[in-house]
Image (cartoon, rainbow, N blue to C red):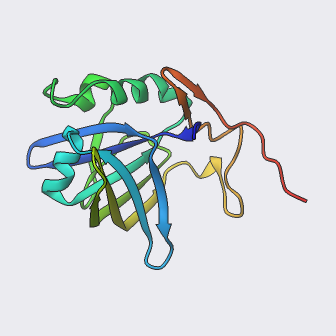
């Protein structure tokens, strides 16, 4: 089921903050706007989400690929300041941190959690969606291929990038 777009999930509680790479992310409702992410129950970032009830989904491009890779391979349990350790800078929005320099960010509040075994499905009410890079977004089709180089995780260190728009007949 690869490749899939990979995002940076950010969360904070008190003076703790963390990020993680995630590709199991999807919209699940338009009214009300909701998204879901499947997340390992042992994840440090998920612990902060459980405590605060808020998180952000950050869309970064291929120029941040090494930071995205590190965010997916370094555990917040092992480093004191994971965002800095992977090279990401967080800024607080009203509810959850967002990644400085992200093309877009979606801030959500946990609505429901479903236990699935080693992962939980976290469904969030979208509180705010911000586009920071209007030059790479088309109101009709969304992200502009070739400009919005959202990495898609293929396997291990392998990623592919979207580069062509094909319109169905």
Q: Quarter-wise, where is residue 129 in the image?
A: bottom left
- The percent coordinates of residue 62 (x first, y second) are 55, 30
Q: Is 28 placed left or right of 80 in the picture?
A: right
Residue located at (28% from left, 24% from top): 74
In the displayed structure, would residue 151 be above or below residue 126? Answer: above
Q: Nearer the viewer, residue 67 or 42?
A: 42
Residue 143, relative to residue 107: is it above or below?
above
Residue 146, quarter of picture: top right
- Whether 37 is drawn above or below 29: the answer is above
* Residue at horizontal 57 percent and vertical 36 percent from the top: 152
The residue drawn where x is 38% and y is 67% is 126
Q: Quadrant of the N terminus?
A: top right
Query: x, y (%) of residue 49?
Result: 21, 52
Name the residue at the front extreme.
Answer: 117
Between 12 and 39, the residue placed more toward the observer is: 39
Front-lying residue, 112 or 76: 112
């Amino acid at each position: 089921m690869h490749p899939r777009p990979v995002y940076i999930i950010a969360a904070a509680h008190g003076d703790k903050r963390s990020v993680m790479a995630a590709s199991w992310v999807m919209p699940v409702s338009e009214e009300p706007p909701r998204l879901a992410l499947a997340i390992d129950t042992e994840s440090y970032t998920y612990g902060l989400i459980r405590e605060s009830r808020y998180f952000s989904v950050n869309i970064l491009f291929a120029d941040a690929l090494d930071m995205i890779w590190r965010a997916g391979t370094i555990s917040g349990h092992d480093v004191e300041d994971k965002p800095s350790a992977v090279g990401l800078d967080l800024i607080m929005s009203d509810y959850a941190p967002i990644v400085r320099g992200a093309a877009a960010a979606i801030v959500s509040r946990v609505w429901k959690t479903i236990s699935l075994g080693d992962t939980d499905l976290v469904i969030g009410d979208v509180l705010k969606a911000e586009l920071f890079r209007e030059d790479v977004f088309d109101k009709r089709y969304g992200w502009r291929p070739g400009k919005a180089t959202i990495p898609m995780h293929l396997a291990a260190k392998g990623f592919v990038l979207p580069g062509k728009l094909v319109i169905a007949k």
